Image: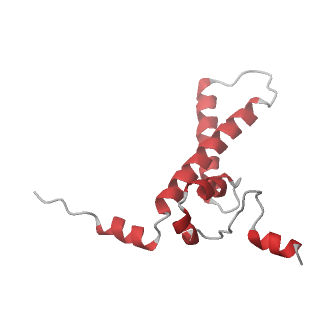
Amino acid sequence: MKIIPSSTNTSSQRINPVKPYEEIAEGMETSFTSHMLKEMRKTIPKEAPDSSSMDYYNSLLDQERAEIMAKSDSGLGVKKVILDQIVPQHLKHYLKNSHPIDRQGMTTMAKENTHE
């Protein structure tokens, strides 16, 4: 029995080798945002506690909102920070909207503008 690798997997790796890193970072931002929304919901004063079905519905709603926020380019920005940390240096040019960041957190472009 021969195992033939999927051609879509290898072709997508050639086109965008940072795709697995982006998926990991997006998942981490989704998890963080979902947890943040859950904790924010706890701060809302209520006269009576929610039923278990309402708690479940709210958790699904928080998860869906978190996924939408993580997929958008204007999310919390956690995904960009994580990508900057986990993507190998030789693959950083594949990231869209990437700017080289130094240790102080300023972009090299911003540094050049401050010296003029």
Picture coordinates of residue 4, whole percent (x, y): 20, 63
The residue drawn where x is 65% and y is 58% is 80
Picture coordinates of residue 3, whole percent (x, y): 18, 59
Left or right: residue 9 versus residue 1 is right
Relative vertical location of residue 11 with respect to residue 74 in this rendering, above or below: below
Which quadrant of the figure contains the C terminus?
A: bottom right
Visual colour scheme: secondary structure
Picture coordinates of residue 55, whole percent (x, y): 63, 29
Relative vertical location of residue 72 with respect to residue 33 in this rendering, above or below: below
Outermost residue to the top: 48
Which quadrant of the figure contains the N terminus?
A: bottom left
The residue drawn where x is 81% and y is 70% is 110
Picture coordinates of residue 87, whole percent (x, y): 54, 59
Pick the front one: 88 or 79: 88
Left or right: residue 94 versus residue 9 is right
Outermost residue to the bottom: 116
The residue drawn where x is 44% and y is 73% is 15
Pick the front one: 100 or 22: 100
Left or right: residue 87 versus residue 38 is left
- Image quadrant of residue 47? top right
